[in-house]
Image (spheres, rainbow, N blue to C red):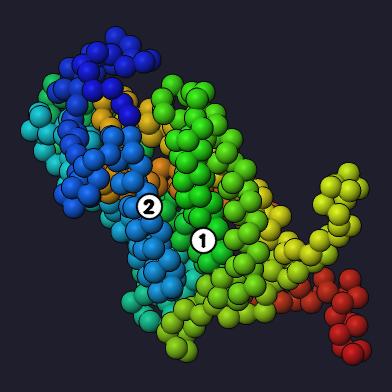
């Protein structure tokens, strides 16, 4: 927890103090005890330490239950939830800036912030619709026009907001206004861009969405548990309650959890198949022949370990090997998203981004590591898993002029003949 005194925090400099006076105070977002009254009464006899433990535990179980429910409801609901979480996280960060900015009664900041959020979402989700709903877009004339000029429209919308910002500039407050302009854009970069990557991961298969998120959740829970019961050695000054015992215990627990969860989920097509849009039924489908990643393979155990485990080979899914990389990142690098958020909160002397979830703070407090994890998963898939997408290449091919299509066809035919592939197919 952050100190509640008015003294300077660790790492705070004189310039930080000057900034606080310029921006109108050291505590823009007040915090309070938001624990539900029913829990307060039930846990009134416990110490504050154990009371916090039970509140966090009960709310964590409730959030995990909600997570299972939205997974059961399918990919469309998941995408809607991602959008809602994105909007709420954006609201929490912008509100911190607005509480500082509002003291000068300067125009349009909050309006422009939400306008830029709309513009960026229009750009990213328009790209997604064009990529994954190509047939539907080509079938509807208005959608086809919007798709064709999508980037120009997106730029025009952003340019409108840019001009509105310039017109809103007020003499003597230029520096603060440009500071808040940057605040908005950095928030958009962190929140919207990475939530868009979560959607892309979901389309690769729900397993690429569920396993990374679950690993972050597991690491958060187990690091807290190990730290609560065994923590003695402080880990980092930004988060005084984080300990090495919790960090290490969370790592091993998360790797083991990732292996087990991956083994269970790899056996179900509904989790392993890419999420695709069926134009005949106008609905999402997750039915396919599982790729090699999700087919059991036999692996030789290193000789050094054979005497320990008593086996020479082990059967496992290749995806489980990838899950080790995912869980390792969630355990070792993912927490730095939380440390970054802690530094941000300490800079403004606030305990949490908001009071949305009792005992846990705001939505952003729960998703600070998830966004960093989503970026890693997207980069990992692009680097080690996914090759060129034939369906997208065909979509682009069909949008070309007939002469361009014919040129590509002849070039491809000549290439296949030179390699002997086309001739062998004709002979067959």
Quadrant of the rendering where the C terminus is positioned: bottom right
Quadrant of the rendering where the N terminus is positioned: top left
Sort mark 2 into few (<14), some (14-19) or many (20+) by Cα contacts within 10 Å: some
Image height of 198 relative to 376, above or below: below
The residue identified by callout 2 is: 60
* Label drawn at residue 346: none
Q: Position of residue 317 (x, y in %)?
A: 72, 64
User: CA separation, marks 1 and 2?
Assistant: 17 Å
Return the residue found at the far top: 14
Q: Position of residue 152 (x, y in %)?
A: 37, 58
Image height of 110 relative to 297, above or below: above
Residue in view at x 47 percent, y 89 percent? 280
Task: Please state which of the two labelled residues, at mark 1 or mark 2, is closer to the viewer.
Answer: 2
Q: Position of residue 69 (x, y in %)?
A: 39, 69
Sort mark 1 into few (<14), some (14-19) or many (20+) by Cα contacts within 10 Å: some
Instruction: State the residue in front, 235 or 195.
Output: 235
Instruction: State the residue in front, 383 or 308.
Output: 308
| 1 or 2: tag closer to the N-terminus | 2
Q: Is residue 8 left or right of residue 411?
A: left
Asked where in the image residue 295 lies, by quadrant, the reply is bottom right
Q: How many marks?
A: 2
Residue in view at x 38 percent, y 15 percent? 11
Asked where in the image residue 385 lies, by quadrant, the reply is bottom right
- The local secondary structure at tag 1 comes to helix
Residue in view at x 37 percent, y 49 percent? 57
Q: Is residue 155 visible?
A: no
Q: Is residue 424 left or right of residue 186?
A: right
Instruction: State the residue in front, 100 or 69.
Output: 69
- The local secondary structure at tag 2 comes to helix
Residue in view at x 47 percent, y 50 percent? 217
* Label drawn at residue 210: 1
Image height of 252 relative to 267, above or below: above
């Amino acid at each position: 927890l952050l100190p509640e005194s008015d003294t300077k925090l660790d790492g705070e400099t004189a310039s930080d103090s000057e900034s606080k006076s310029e921006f109108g105070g050291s505590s823009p977002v007040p915090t309070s005890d938001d624990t539900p009254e029913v829990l307060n009464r039930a846990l009134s006899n416990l110490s504050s330490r154990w009371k916090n433990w039970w509140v966090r535990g009960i709310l964590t179980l409730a959030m995990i239950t909600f997570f299972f429910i939205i997974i059961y409801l399918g990919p469309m609901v998941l995408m809607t939830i991602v959008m809602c979480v994105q909007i709420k996280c954006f609201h929490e960060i912008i509100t911190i800036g607005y509480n500082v900015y509002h003291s000068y009664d300067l125009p349009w900041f909050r309006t422009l912030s939400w306008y830029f959020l709309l513009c960026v979402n229009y750009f990213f989700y328009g790209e997604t619709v064009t990529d994954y709903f190509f047939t539907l877009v080509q079938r509807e004339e208005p959608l086809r026009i919007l798709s064709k000029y999508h980037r120009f429209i997106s730029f025009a919308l952003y340019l409108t907001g840019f001009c509105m910002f310039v017109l809103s500039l007020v003499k003597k407050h230029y520096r603060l206004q440009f500071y808040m302009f940057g605040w908005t854009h950095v928030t958009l970069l962190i929140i919207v861009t990475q939530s868009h990557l979560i959607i892309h991961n979901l389309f690769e298969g729900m397993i690429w969405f569920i396993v990374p998120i679950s690993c972050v959740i597991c690491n958060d829970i187990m690091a807290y548990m190990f730290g609560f019961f065994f923590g003695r050695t402080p880990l980092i000054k930004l988060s005084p309650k984080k300990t090495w015992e919790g960090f290490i215990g969370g790592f091993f627990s998360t790797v083991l959890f990732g292996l087990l969860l991956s083994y269970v989920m790899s056996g179900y097509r509904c989790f392993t198949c890419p999420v695709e849009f069926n134009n005949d039924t106008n609905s999402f489908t997750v039915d396919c022949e599982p790729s090699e990643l999700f087919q059991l393979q036999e692996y030789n155990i290193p000789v050094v370990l054979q005497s320990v485990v008593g086996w020479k080979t082990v059967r496992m899914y290749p995806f489980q090997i990838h899950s080790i990389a995912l869980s390792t990142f969630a355990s070792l690098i993912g927490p730095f998203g939380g440390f970054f958020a802690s530094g941000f909160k300490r800079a403004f002397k606030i305990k949490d981004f908001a009071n949305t979830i009792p005992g846990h703070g705001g939505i952003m407090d729960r998703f600070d590591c998830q966004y960093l994890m989503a970026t890693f998963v997207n980069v990992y898939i692009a680097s080690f898993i996914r090759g060129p997408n034939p369906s997208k290449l065909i979509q682009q091919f069909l949008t070309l002029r007939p002469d361009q299509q014919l040129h590509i066809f002849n070039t491809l035919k000549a290439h296949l003949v030179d390699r002997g592939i086309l001739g062998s197919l004709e002979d067959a």
